[in-house]
Image (cartoon, rainbow, N blue to C red):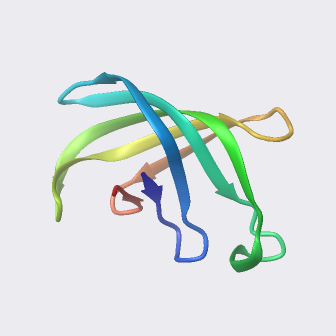
Amino acid sequence: MITACGASSQTPVNHLSWSTWTDTYAVGTGVYVVNSCEPDCASGNYNHYPASIVLSNPGSTTWGTLFTQAKITYVDQNGQSQSNNLTYPQLVTH
């Protein structure tokens, strides 16, 4: 799964494993890859964090019916819990 914020700052979620998958939501875990964008996004470093993912709000998209919202939660390098909430079309699945 790739969350798109621009060509040089895409943040994929790899190694996905789903514990729940229904018509209305999905819950899983994976590895969230976050670009540090230091000094800029094109030359930033990528950090890998274990993450939980919740997909929800199924809706009609150009690719058919997809979950249109994702919440990705992870603990950063400083031990702080972080959450990213994404909504289609920012959320792009492959």
Outermost residue on the front side: it is 15
The C terminus - image quarter: bottom left
- Provide residue 64's location: percent of width, then percent of height: 13, 56
Does 94 appear above or below 23?
below
Residue at image point 66% right, 55% down: 34
Q: Nearer the viewer, residue 2 or 15?
A: 15
Residue at image point 59% right, 34% down: 51
- Provide residue 48's location: percent of width, then percent of height: 69, 46
Does 50 appear above or below 40?
above
Q: How many marks?
A: 0
Does 23 appear above or below 2?
above
Q: Left or right of 31: which side holds 90?
A: left
- Provide residue 20's location: percent of width, then percent of height: 33, 21
Q: Nearer the viewer, residue 22 or 89?
A: 22
- Provide residue 8's location: percent of width, then percent of height: 60, 76
Q: Left or right of 40: which side holds 28?
A: left
Residue at image point 21% right, 42% down: 58
Q: Left or right of 90: which side holds 84?
A: right
Residue at image point 76% right, 70% down: 44
Q: Left or right of 43: which side holds 11?
A: left
